Amino acid sequence: PARKVAFIEDPTYFLAPKIFKEQGFRMVPVPLRTGGGGGMDLDRLEAQVLAAKARGELELELVPEKGRDGPQFAGVVYCIPSHQNPSGGSMPGEARARLVQLAREHSLLVVSDDVYELLHHPATATAQAPHGAPPPPPPRLVAYDLEEPSDGGAQSGVVGGGNVLGNGTFSKVLSPGVRCGWIEARPALVRALAASATVSSSGGSAQLMGAMVAGALDAGALDPLVDSTRQLLAKRMAAVQRAFKRRAPRGCSLSAPQGGMCAWLELPPGTDAHSVLVAARRRGVSFKPGDLFSPAGDQHRNCCRVVVAHYDEGTLVRGIEILCQVLHDELAAGIAT
């Protein structure tokens, strides 16, 4: 396309906007559904896509650029459909199916960042959480794209080529230092990626780490590790939820994720999370303010991300208790507004 466009959920993983910007994309923020619990607002996405088309920004090239093979797309959608970072919310199954249909209709590539896909919290570990045990997760987003479209692909700008690229990683299960993962997509997309110069030169492959991970998979070591990681994260999240419920200041809410390691803390409108952060750090507690996760750069300043991956239950509970006390103090004094 003459101008590359990426539709990015807002809030999102804080490094994603920078990555797209470095690759020359114009970013179009798309809000999450109200409350952040249902993934990207697809009505808003469709409206933004149609507006971009009206500006002539989403036109497929009639003659592809010389030397570029494989499927061509008019634009990109970036989302984290399961246990989203930072909100913790997940896109329901019917929304996943609709997103794939929108991508086919408008020749869009959906980059589905599936880094938390395996980390659904088991019911046995969350039964004591304030919100109860979660329902089973829907199929991963790419599974809907692997199904044949009812019209045989005639509506898609990349007939039969697929419109979803699922990005998985072992770094959230084995160790943060394991920078090794996998891509899941329809065969045409996989072939296009495999034929790229970067892959052909082995410049982007973690060969040694990949061999070690393959050995762990062959030995059956990964399944019990995934199970224990899910149990651990679920217990920590449940403990954080209980502590917050006991101490939460009026007007503050914490999302109730069904998996992953992130929760989204919303403060009263007009509250400046950066001011709260300064006070919290004086008490030994830290977090990332919400505007750091906004592709627009100026949204969610009254929010912050809470992560349960780095500390044990006792430390996390104490941290939440301190943060709630800081919020009580700051809000009562009117300092954080």
Image (cartoon, rainbow, N blue to C red):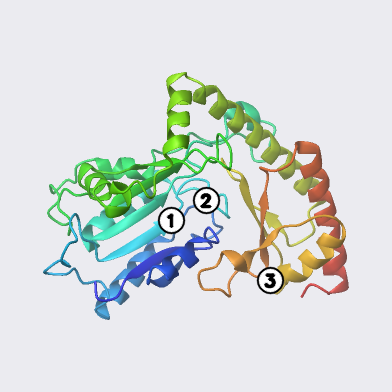
Residue 255 visible within the image: no
Q: Which residue is mark 1?
A: 79
Q: Residue 121 falls in which quadrant of the image?
A: top right
The reply to whether callout 2 and callout 1 are in contact (CB within 8 Å) is: yes
Q: Is residue 286 left or right of residue 43?
A: right
Task: Name which of mark 1 and mark 3 comes first in the sequence.
Answer: 1
Residue 216 vertical position relative to residue 142 in the rendered view, above or below: above
Mark 2 is on which residue type? Gln
Q: Residue 284 falls in which quadrant of the image?
A: bottom right
Q: Which residue is mark 2?
A: 84
Task: Name which of mark 3 and mark 2 comes first in the sequence.
Answer: 2
Name the residue nearer the viewer: 270 or 159.
159
Residue 280 appears at what percent x and percent y? Answer: 82, 61
Q: Which residue is mark 3?
A: 269
State the separation of the CA atoms marked 3 and 2.
22 Å
State the separation of the CA atoms marked 1 and 3.
26 Å
Name the residue nearer the viewer: 181 or 66.
66
Task: Name which of mark 2 and mark 1 comes first in the sequence.
Answer: 1
Mark 1 is on which residue type? Cys
Give the crowd class for mark 3: few <14, some 14-19, many >=20 residues within 10 Å: few
Residue 308 vertical position relative to residue 281 in the rendered view, above or below: above
